Amino acid sequence: MNTIQGFCCSIFGVLFFLLQGFTEGVLRMSAFRQIDGLCAETEVVHRAVGSSLELIPDHPKTNLTDVKWTFNETVFAEYTKNELKLLRDNLFAGWLEKGDISITVNNLQLQDSGLFSIVQEGHSGQYETKFIQLHVHDLIRNVTIEHNEIWLQSKNICTFNLWCLVSDNVNTSYHWSGYPNNKGSHLNISLTPEVSATLNCTVSNIVSVNYTTKTVKCSETLGQGFLKKNLLLISIVAGAVCIAVAIGIIAVCYRRRAQKGKGESEAGITVYEDVNVDPVAKKRSDSTINGTSIYETVQDVRVTSNMPQTVYDKISYQRQQVVTPSTSSPYQKVL
């Protein structure tokens, strides 16, 4: 496939030719021919990953004095003074190989796609530039057919959805044997019970072709299996819902219990208090004044005034304060 690209002469070159004379005009036109090319053709080339591309000038070596090879406007090799040199051999994913008057790019990869040009100059002047547009494609590998099936009990048929899959689906075409009107990678067919079909999917691009086959069959067990799958799915969903409801009920009960316990704590009952505390004995704001202390128990009672107040009262608590004729001496009490 060749696509003609370019022009036969430069309008700027013609203007310079008319204004500055024949000699200067020729030089200007040559310069534009070197940059843009005159009447140049662009050759479109397709290669597979891992292949090679040989870049050969259009003229024999004896007629050439200077040649430059460029890739996307970057010079990577040149021939001058009867010597061929590689200037940018790391420009490509593969490697460059020198010939007598040619350059070969080996082990092409996808990133090597681009525009190559060969600028050629001879003893009598510059020749037209040769352009090559390279497209590198991956090979078709690992073609597989995946499918799923649906049992339509109302119609008593099986419906199959099939997909033809490849590792690289760029610029690829698909062909299903027996189904010429189907152009894509997806195919839908219906089969009655106990009927099978062998399907062939061929995938191709501009550099390679590959295919695979698969056999599918509709049977009554397929419908039963589909029903079992649905019942199993329903059982799983129902079980999950029941578990979620149970967890929700437990969480609500726990929350209510926690709130109830919190309310009782705020009402004044703590872990440090006794459940059976006497409300009368609980009030102890004047305990120090009335003779009680922190060492008393919860149910202690304030000591009354009739009890002994000193160690001396322990001997005779009910002694009389004043001795009268009707009473004995306090010393008689001891005896």
Image (cartoon, grey):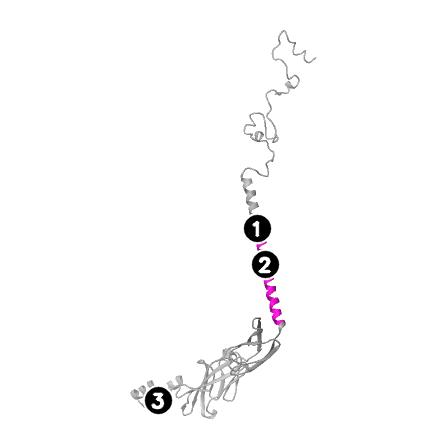
Please give the label number shown on residue 144: none
Instruction: Choose top left, top right, bottom left or bottom right for residue 311.
Output: top right
Where is mark 2, residue-wise? 240
State yes or no: residue 235 in magenta.
yes
The region drawn magenta spans 221-250
325 w.r.t. 310: above or below: above
Viewed as shown, does residue 118 lie left or right of 317? left
The residues bearing labels 2 and 1 have C-alpha atoms spaced at a distance of: 17 Å
Instruction: Choose top left, top right, bottom left or bottom right for residue 319.
Output: top right
From the viewer's side, name the closer residue of 102 and 148: 148
Viewed as shown, does residue 318 lie left or right of 31? right
Indicate the position of residue 297 as horizontal and vertical percent values. Answer: 62, 31
Q: Residue at x 33, y 86 (%)?
A: 11
Sequence-wise, which precedes: disc 2 or disc 1?
2
Q: Amino acid at mark 3?
A: Val
Instruction: Choose top left, top right, bottom left or bottom right for residue 231.
Output: bottom right
Q: Residue at x 57, y 51 (%)?
A: 249
Viewed as shown, does residue 270 lie left or right of 61? right
From the viewer's side, name the closer residue of 20 and 179: 179
Q: Are marks 3 and 2 in contact (CB under 8 Å)?
A: no
198 w.r.t. 63: above or below: above
Front position among marks 1 and 3:
1
Mark 2 Cα shell of 10 Å, populated few (<14), some (14-19), many (≥20): few
Per the picture, the main secondary structure of the magenta-coloured stretch is helix
Where is mark 1, residue-wise? 251
Indicate the position of residue 278 as horizontal and vertical percent values. Answer: 59, 31
Q: Residue at x 45, y 92 (%)?
A: 63
